[in-house]
Amino acid sequence: MGTYSRRRTDRQRLDMVEKQIRRRGVADERVLQAMSLVPRHRFVPKAQFSAAYADCALPIGHGVTISQPYVVAMMTEALSVGPGIRVLEIGTGSGYQAAVLGACGAEVFSIERIPELHRRADRLLEEIGCGDIALRLGDGSRGWPERAPFDRILVTAAAPDVPAPLREQLADGGLLVAPVGDDWLQTVRRYRKMGASFEYEELEGVRFVPLIVDSGEGSG
Ligand code: SAM
C-alpha cells in the first residue's frame, strides 16, 4: 500500500474513533488507543475495503460479519481488559476483535468454527502482530478447557443463553460479555461470576449472527 493510502486509512481510523466511538461515550483510553492502531481495513474482504471504517457491520463471507466498530469498542470497554488479563473470545471471524483485545495488552484465546475464517485470521494476525493471540478451530460453545480458567470471556455470536462450559471456565470474580437473545434482536449482557452467583446487567441492544452449536468435535 502506498504512502497516500496509508495516510488515508490512518485518518479514517482516527475519524472513526472520534466520531463513532468516543462521541458515543466510550471513554477507556486503552480501548480508544487500540482501535486507533489496529488496521481495520486489513480485516475486511477487498470488496469491502472502501467501507472498512464505516459505521456498520460488514460481510466477511460465509454469511458472517465483522462487527460495527462502535459495538467492538463498547463490548471491549465492558470487558475491562488490560495487560496480563486472560481473555477467551468465541467467534474469531475476521480476527479484528481479537486484534483489538491483543492491542489492549490482553492474552487472547479465540475460537472460530469455520475453517477458512480461522486460517485467514491466523495468517493475518501473524503478519500484523497484534500481541499475544492464540487461535483454535472448533465449537466455541464448549470453551477451551485446557487453557481455562479465563479472567474474561467475550462471546461475539448470539445465543438465547450463555453455554454452561463458558460459565464454568470463567474465573471467580471474572466478567463475561455476550449478546443474549433470539436470532433477530439481542441485548449485550455483562455477567460477573462471584462464587456460585452469576449476575448480569444489560448494556445495549445489538444484532449478531447466531452462535452455532456443532454436533461432534472437529477442533484442533
Ligand atoms: N469477532 C469477529 C470479528 O472481529 O470479526 C466477528 C464475529 S461474527 C459476528 C460471529 C462469528 O462467530 C462468526 O465468525 C461465526 O462463524 C462464529 N461462530 C458462530 N458459532 C460459533 C461457535 N459455536 N464456535 C465458534 N465460532 C462460532
Image (cartoon, helix red, strand yellow):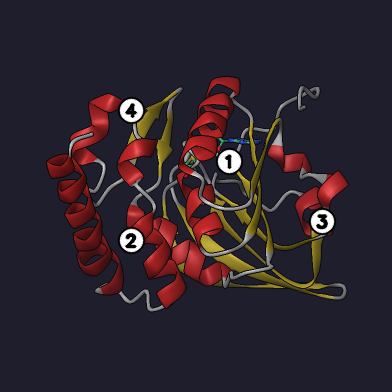
Q: Which residue is mark 2?
A: 36
Residue at disc 1, secondary structure: loop
At label 4, which amino acid type do we have?
Pro
Q: Are marks 1 and 4 in contact (CB under 8 Å)?
A: no
Q: Residue furthest front?
A: 3
Q: Is residue 93 visible?
A: no
Q: Where in the figure is residue 140, as x and y percent of width and height?
A: 70, 39
Q: Amino acid at mark 1?
A: Gly
**The N terminus, quarter of image:** top left
Say whether residue 113 is left or right of residue 187: right
Quarter holding residue 177: bottom right
- Classify mark 3: helix, strand or loop: helix
User: Which residue was labeled with disc 1?
Assistant: 91
Whether residue 17 is visible: yes
Question: Which one is closest to the eye, mark 2 or mark 3?
Answer: 2
Q: Which residue is mark 4?
A: 45
In 3D space, how far apart are the residues under numbered discs 1 and 4 (Cα atoms)?
A: 17 Å
Q: Cα distance, mark 3 to mark 1?
A: 16 Å
Q: Residues within 10 Å of mark 3 (few under 14, many from 20)?
A: many
Q: Report the residue marked by disc 3.
A: 169
